Image (tube, rainbow, N blue to C red):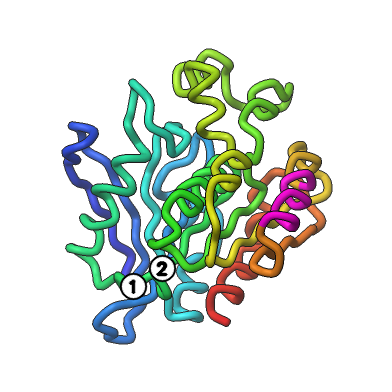
Amino acid sequence: MSLINLSYRTNYLHTYFKTTAVIPDTNEKEYPTLFLLHGYTGDDSAWIRHTNIEKLARKYNIAVVMPEARNAFYTDSDFIPYYSFFVDELIDKLRNNLPLATNKAENFIAGSSMGGYGALKIGFKNPDLFSHVAALSPITDIIHFRNNPQTPMANNTFDTIFDSPEKIADNQLVNIVSNKNYSQKIMTICGTDDYMYQDNLDFKNFMTNKIGKNYTWHEVSGNHSWDTWVDNVETIFRWISE
């Protein structure tokens, strides 16, 4: 098992960004690949620090790549055009440097909290890139997240990224889903004590009606914390390996 730390200058962002990758050691030419996104205040090391990702990558023979996002909400803004960087530059850069699969069937994206939102948005907007899209405790309604007293994000930071009603509407997940038809498999997981549980439940009802059999919902015990995500991240690995 190889743990690789990459630092690279990006053409989109004009600065250096980091990605941590876990690559199995079974000598495959290309590995099925999970893009695993961190939450607010996290970085590319978050999943390594808090979970047994290396063990899961080995067990399921899946490469896991974990890019940093610098609280950019996986969204294009005047501050950081992160979404365009991820879709138009990062994926190819990683594939050029690591033994990662390029076909849709062996590419997956997942994340927790802000990273769950990012995984869902990137996955929904790019159905030809990822066969499976999963989220643990995702932010499913960005306005509710902004106005929730438990949110860790300052309003002025949110407003810098989502700086107009049109920008907010364009980045609401239900609006993105409403404009697409999907062949992907989608999964969301949320704890019943999560402060965004009701938003996740509402999103589950929306997705069940919109996507039907390609959507899976897991309601688990737990709150909005690494304890919950540690207990449930293997569910995602099992699901994408079926």
Give whichever of 131, 59 is nearer the camera.
Answer: 131
Label 2, label 1: how far apart the Cα atoms are: 7 Å
Residue at position x 47%, y 59% from top?
A: 109
- Side (left or right) of 53 relative to 65: right
List x then y, in percent, for residue 227: 68, 53
List x then y, in percent, for residue 12: 22, 36
Residue at position x 61%, y 63% from top?
A: 233
Picture quadrant where residue 81 is located: top left
List x then y, in percent, for residue 105: 42, 74
Query: Can I make out residue 38 in this image?
Result: no
Picture quadrant where residue 231 is located: bottom right
- Side (left or right) of 69 relative to 123: left
User: Element under label 2?
Assistant: strand
Quadrant position of the C terminus in the picture:
bottom right
Residue 206 belongs to magenta span: yes
Residue, disc 2: 107
Q: Which amino acid does label 2 sit on?
A: Asn
Residue at position x 20%, y 33% from top?
A: 15
| Closer mark to the observer between disc 2 and disc 1 | 1
**Quick check: marks 2 and 1 in contact, CB under 8 Å?**
yes
List x then y, in percent, for residue 218: 75, 62
Q: Which amino acid does label 1 sit on?
A: Asn
Find the magenta span and give its range: 201-210
